Amino acid sequence: MMKQVFSYFAIMTALLFSLGSAQNVRLTVWDQHTGPADPAAEQIYQLFMEQNPDITIEREIFAGQDLNQLVPTALAGGTGPDVMYYDVAAAREVFRAGLILPLDDFAAEYGWRDKFYPAGLQWSVIDGQVAGLGLEYEFVGVFVNDDPMEAEGFSVPSNLEETLAFCQAASEQGYIPFAHGQNPGWQAFFSFTMPVHNTLGVAYMENLLFNGEGDWTNESMVRAVEVVYRDMRDAGCFVDDVNGLDFPAQQDVFFSGEALLLPTGTWVVGEILTNMDANVSMVPFPATVAGGDRIYTAGMGSAFFVNSRTEHPEAAARFLDFMFSDEAVKIWIETAGFIPPVPVDTMTLELAPLTAFVLDTLQAAGSGTGDLQLGYNIDLIAPQVFNTMMRDGFQAVMAGTKSPAEQLADLQRLWDER
């Protein structure tokens, strides 16, 4: 009898221990969701915990630049989080160092390759393996402050000639034509990416970026740089201290109506809707050659990745999958202004016109149902040393201490060394 009681006690103890352990899985998540994305993340994480009572999320928020510096060191030292929302380009080196968990088995289990648009998932596929899940499918163009544009009788410029005339007229009326700045310098990624796509075309850039065909120093590439860093600069399209203008200040002068156009990516939609009681639209960057194309360039800035040393890979995968559930996607879109790279029933959403435009544009491109072709954000494909040269070198070009040809020669050298 005593033996039976002992066995029963042992079984119950093991069972309770097992249940207690299952109810105490703690996932540490590092993210960079601030502004409108902060309440969205809080709501979604809370929903996940309500539906998964065996998992507790311990969230820590960082600035994006801080996260880029912290993650590699933390993961290498074994002190990092279980899950991180981290820069896609920076993650490549971390993944190849074995510090980020390959997710192919979980991708098969949850059907992620079928669930995600291929054009969206590919940004977090590294060396053929699913390394993470990108949340913000983004594209870059020019936001237009429609109310003062209409009040002043200005038309949105569609080509270089119109752009230079617009900058002169807007400046004379006391406006900043383009709210473009280059402090700390990453903004130059897009003031380079957009004109080179419009000048050379998507096919050329695709072959250069992915197939190694073409080069960064040809005459058309030089001309694309001259458009922004000589012609537009000299026409007064930017503030005088363009290298000193940081991104928050860029947004502020646009939000206030002091600036008329804001060249940047769709990640600012939430901020625009939060800070502006005005009509805002979005257009591609002006054509840079006569009769040329106007192309949006797209990419995935950050994604959810899993620490290769996590003790809870299954719980982490369950968390990632929930981030792209119907209820989570609805919150990401409506609250944060993010566009996850998964099909969405827009009839179930309450969308501002600007958000609806962004969503429709990306869904058409992602699903292949429209004739829209998106280009590629160069910084998400290029190695970090190349991006550093873009950042620092284009500041020098804007300042007139370096020529476009010299900058492109430096980029070509680093591209060849990658």
Image: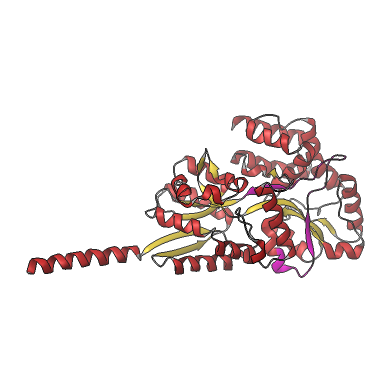
Q: Position of residue 380 (x, y in %)?
A: 62, 44
Q: Position of residue 231 (x, y in %)?
A: 85, 43
> Compared to 78, does 331 lie above or below?
below
Residue 280 belongs to magenta span: yes
- Choose between 34 and 344: the one closer to the eye: 344
Identity of the residue drawn at 64% across and 42% down:
387
Q: Position of residue 286 (x, y in %)?
A: 82, 47
Dividing the picture into quadrants, the one containing residue 324 is: bottom right
Q: Residue furthest left?
A: 1
Q: Position of residue 271 (x, y in %)?
A: 68, 64
Tell me the quarter of the image containing the C terminus.
top right
Identity of the residue drawn at 81% across and 65% down:
257
Dividing the picture into quadrants, the one containing residue 288 is: top right
Q: Tell me where the magenta segment starts and ends, as one range.
A: 272-300
**Can residue 411 be seen by looking at this rendering?**
no
Residue 236 belongs to magenta span: no
- Choose between 304 and 350: the one closer to the eye: 350
> Compared to 84, does 231 lie above or below?
above
Tell me the quarter of the image containing the N terminus.
bottom left
Q: How is the image coloured?
A: secondary structure
**Can residue 294 be seen by looking at this rendering?**
yes
Identity of the residue drawn at 68% across and 33% down:
207
- Choose between 399 and 225: the one closer to the eye: 225
For residue 348, side relative to residue 110 (left or right)? right
Identity of the residue drawn at 75% across and 68% down:
276
| Total marks placed | 0
